[in-house]
Image (spheres, rainbow, N blue to C red):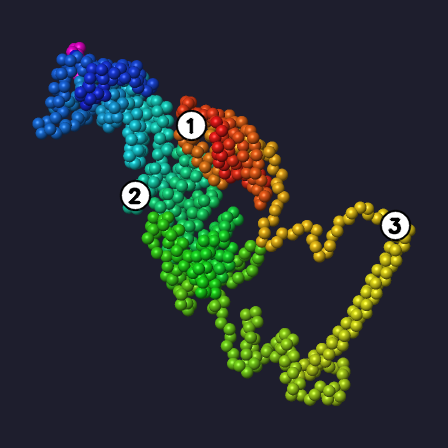
């Protein structure tokens, strides 16, 4: 062994020489030499001092010196095997015994365990090697107590009062915390990872050292926050303090982002779409009360997403806790959202839960949710309205679309019968004031009709208003005792007689015939009674007669008007005939004195019973005129495609430009190719030449055309920045392009290789 100078203190570390060099026990001399060279070349981070690097180098050199000497290596291997295996062939584990005040002089290994003795000044080098080998727990076990309990470090007030090796030990312990946190992060232990990272950060902040390492740890803590939130929120509800910590972390992220759909930077690395998916994921771990409180606060920023999530929490809470007032609040919030999107279906469901069945049916007709409407109509097939299907859909919607996103409502059933049977719900719906419901383009006043289970209903669902209005029952033949309804108010029998004056003419004629059937003939009555100015003050019977006489007077006046109209029409016809006669005579005289030149040559023979052009038979395909698509247009389309292809598959990976020239299957195919190249970090450089362009017109559709062209393509293929000669090529192909005209622009919908020219 190597002798130590007098006065030096030996420290034993839980390592062996083979592990220091990263070698197996049976390594050859060549492997030993190569491992030593590799370890000497691999330097630690630039933040370490030269003293720490030199200490590490001394330990590596000592290990190489022992193992490179055959005699020393043989003796060490015997010691190694004796301390590694016990008589029962059980592997022993290395451990470190640390006293309460672990200065370098007090660090020792168990006497029965294998270790390497080093000088006390080489402790920082040993910790650095342990950190490089991934022994982060051992670094913390040896280094952290030394930093907190050593007299020299605890009494120092300024960095320059600390021992020379102190900053290097701080750095090693902090980096061990960083790497241990990342290791726990990958294993899914997010809260433990946060504890490790925060320990390293607090140590550096306390000692005021290495701000760049502090920033690195801080960055990991920011990116770790979403994972911590999910882990904390999915804990049992009994662990309220831990779950509260998760909600606080979520609130801090929302503040930094400026809301759920905000554009602020929370340094988590999540863009807007990723963060929305994160919010949707964590909803499954929140109760309905927690979501209500969280999203209602966020909706006031304002935030459309938070408003929509608040509406769902209000509906879920209002239904399950039998609080219709919350459902009414959600309905009011839906009216604000309706200015930007179609939420008529949700409005209809809220109206139903508030007992407003007429409004629910009317709003439902405005919805564009065709699948939901199809389901509702199918379930309402035997009903005069959509109410039975709407009730079934509401229960289905609550159980499949609403409740599963709340932790405490996943298994909650939805029963409208039980909801409306609740006394608290009934009391609120009865006290709900009449609201004015406005549909787009209309403003009808529709009275609210509250539904309660006391109504007779065989299907257990609220029925439409028209089904609950029963016509008044009257006895046949007793018209004097009937009560009619006008504007919702009953009329007494004494008012029934005067109401006949508002009856249609056919009713008046019927009453007149009955009256005159029991009275003297009209001719006799006219002979006995002379018309006078007092006819207006006669009784009810004479009133009917006077009305009849007035109708006869009206008939005579109508005949006079007809005669007047005949006279006017006859006069107008005579004027027209006179005008035609004068114009004919005038034309004859004009032709006589100023004759019109006659047409020369063969004239077109057009007959009334024969069309000038051939009309296709019904059902036949009409031949459209060919489109004005020239070779120049075809060449420009192909040229645009090839330049777009160079951009999409080039180093810039401009995949979005493909939509400017491709459509349909061609677009999806080349998008997949470009995305795959971008993912694998490869690109291509093209050179193209176009020759021999031919057009194949589609006579049945002027918006489609096929183009064939010979294309010479020179492609240089680059993989990870290096040119791949095997995949590069120079070839000429005959390609067919199928074009379609869309929005006034020619796009390629498919392409295929006809043959390979060279």
Q: Reply above or below: 472 against 608.
A: below
In this picture, residue 213 sits left or right of residue 327? left
Q: Which residue is drawn at 14% across and 21% down?
A: 80
- Label 1, label 2: how far apart the Cα atoms are: 44 Å
Categorize mark 3 by other alpha carbons within 10 Å: few (<14), some (14-19), many (20+): few
Q: Which residue is drawn at 37% across and 59% down?
A: 415
Q: Residue at x 42, y 50 (%)?
A: 312
Q: Reply above or below: 42 against 391.
A: above
Query: Which residue was labeled with disc 3?
Result: 595
Choose mark 3 or mark 2, whichever is in front.
3
Residue 522: name its quadrant.
bottom right
Residue 589 image offset from top left, x and y in percent:
90, 54
Q: Reply above or below: 81 against 473.
A: above
Choose mark 1 or mark 3, whichever is in front.
3
Question: Mark on residue 498?
Answer: none
Q: Where's the N terminus, which quadrant?
A: top left
Q: Give the range drawn in magenta.
A: 3-10
């Amino acid at each position: 062994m190597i002798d130590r100078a007098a006065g030096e203190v030996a420290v034993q570390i839980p390592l062996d020489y083979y592990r220091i060099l990263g070698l197996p026990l049976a390594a050859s001399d060549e492997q030993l030499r190569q491992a030593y060279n590799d370890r000497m070349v691999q330097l630690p981070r630039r933040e370490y001092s030269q003293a720490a690097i030199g200490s590490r180098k001394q330990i590596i050199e000592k290990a190489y010196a022992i193992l490179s000497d055959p005699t020393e290596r043989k003796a060490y291997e015997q010691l190694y095997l004796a301390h590694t295996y016990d008589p029962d062939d059980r592997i022993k584990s290395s451990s470190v015994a640390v006293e309460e005040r672990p200065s370098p002089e007090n660090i020792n290994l168990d006497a029965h365990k294998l270790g390497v003795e080093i000088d006390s000044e080489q402790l920082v080098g040993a910790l650095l090697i342990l950190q490089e080998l991934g022994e982060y727990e051992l670094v913390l076990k040896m280094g952290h107590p030394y930093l907190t309990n050593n007299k020299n470090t605890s009494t120092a007030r300024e960095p320059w009062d600390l021992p020379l090796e102190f900053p290097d030990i701080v750095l090693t312990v902090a980096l061990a915390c960083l790497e241990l946190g990342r290791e726990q992060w990958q294993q899914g232990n997010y809260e433990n990872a946060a504890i490790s990272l925060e320990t390293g950060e607090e140590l550096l902040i306390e000692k005021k050292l290495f701000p760049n390492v502090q920033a690195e740890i801080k960055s990991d803590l920011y990116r770790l926050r979403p994972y911590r939130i999910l882990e904390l929120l999915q804990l049992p509800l009994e662990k309220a303090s831990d779950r509260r910590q998760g909600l606080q972390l979520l609130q801090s992220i929302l503040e930094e982002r400026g809301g759920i759909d905000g554009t602020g930077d929370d340094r988590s690395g999540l863009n807007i779409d990723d963060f929305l998916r994160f919010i949707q994921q964590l909803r499954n771990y929140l109760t309905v009360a927690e979501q209500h409180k969280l999203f209602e606060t966020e909706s006031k920023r304002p935030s459309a997403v938070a408003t929509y999530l608040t509406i769902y929490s209000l509906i879920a809470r209002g239904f399950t806790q039998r609080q219709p007032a919350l459902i009414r609040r959600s309905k009011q919030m839906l009216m604000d959202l309706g200015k930007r999107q179609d939420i008529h279906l949700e409005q209809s469901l809220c109206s139903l839960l508030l007992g407003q069945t007429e409004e629910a049916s009317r709003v439902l007709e405005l919805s564009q949710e065709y699948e939901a409407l199809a389901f509702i109509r199918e379930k309402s097939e035997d009903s005069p309205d959509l109410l039975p299907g709407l009730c079934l859909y509401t229960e289905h919607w609550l159980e499949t679309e609403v409740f599963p996103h709340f932790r405490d409502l996943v298994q909650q059933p939805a029963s409208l019968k039980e909801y409306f049977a609740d006394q608290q719900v009934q009391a609120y719906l009865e006290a709900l004031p009449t609201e004015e419901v406005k549909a787009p383009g209309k403003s009808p006043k529709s009275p609210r009709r509250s539904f309660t289970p006391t109504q007779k209903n065989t299907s257990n669902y609220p029925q439409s208003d028209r089904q609950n209005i029963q016509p008044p029952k009257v006895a046949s033949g007793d018209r004097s005792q009937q009560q009619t309804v006008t504007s919702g108010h009953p009329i007494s029998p004494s008012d029934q007689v005067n109401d006949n004056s508002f009856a249609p003419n056919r009713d008046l004629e019927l009453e007149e015939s009955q009256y005159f059937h029991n009275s003297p003939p009209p001719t006799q009555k006219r002979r006995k009674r002379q018309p006078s100015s007092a006819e207006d003050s006669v009784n009810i019977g004479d009133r009917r007669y006077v009305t009849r006489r007035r109708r006869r007077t009206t008939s005579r006046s109508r005949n006079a008007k007809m005669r007047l109209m005949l006279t006017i029409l006859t006069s107008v016809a005579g004027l027209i005939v006179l005008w035609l006669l004068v114009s004919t005579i005038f034309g004859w005289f004009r032709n006589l004195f100023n004759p019109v030149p006659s047409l020369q040559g063969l004239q077109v023979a057009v007959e009334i019973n024969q069309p000038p052009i051939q009309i296709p038979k019904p059902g036949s395909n009409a031949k459209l005129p060919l489109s004005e698509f020239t070779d120049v247009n075809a060449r420009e389309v192909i040229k645009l495609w090839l330049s777009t292809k160079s951009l999409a598959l080039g180093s810039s990976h401009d995949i979005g430009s493909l939509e400017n020239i491709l459509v349909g299957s061609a677009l999806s195919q080349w998008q997949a190719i470009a995305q795959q190249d971008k993912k694998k970090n490869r690109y291509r450089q093209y050179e193209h030449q176009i020759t021999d362009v031919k057009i194949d017109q589609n006579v049945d559709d002027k918006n489609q055309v096929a183009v064939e062209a010979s294309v010479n393509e020179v492609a240089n293929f680059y993989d990870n920045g290096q040119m791949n000669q095997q995949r590069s090529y120079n070839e000429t192909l005959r390609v067919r392009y199928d074009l379609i005209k869309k929005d006034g622009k020619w796009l390629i919908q498919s392409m295929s290789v006809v043959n390979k020219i060279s």
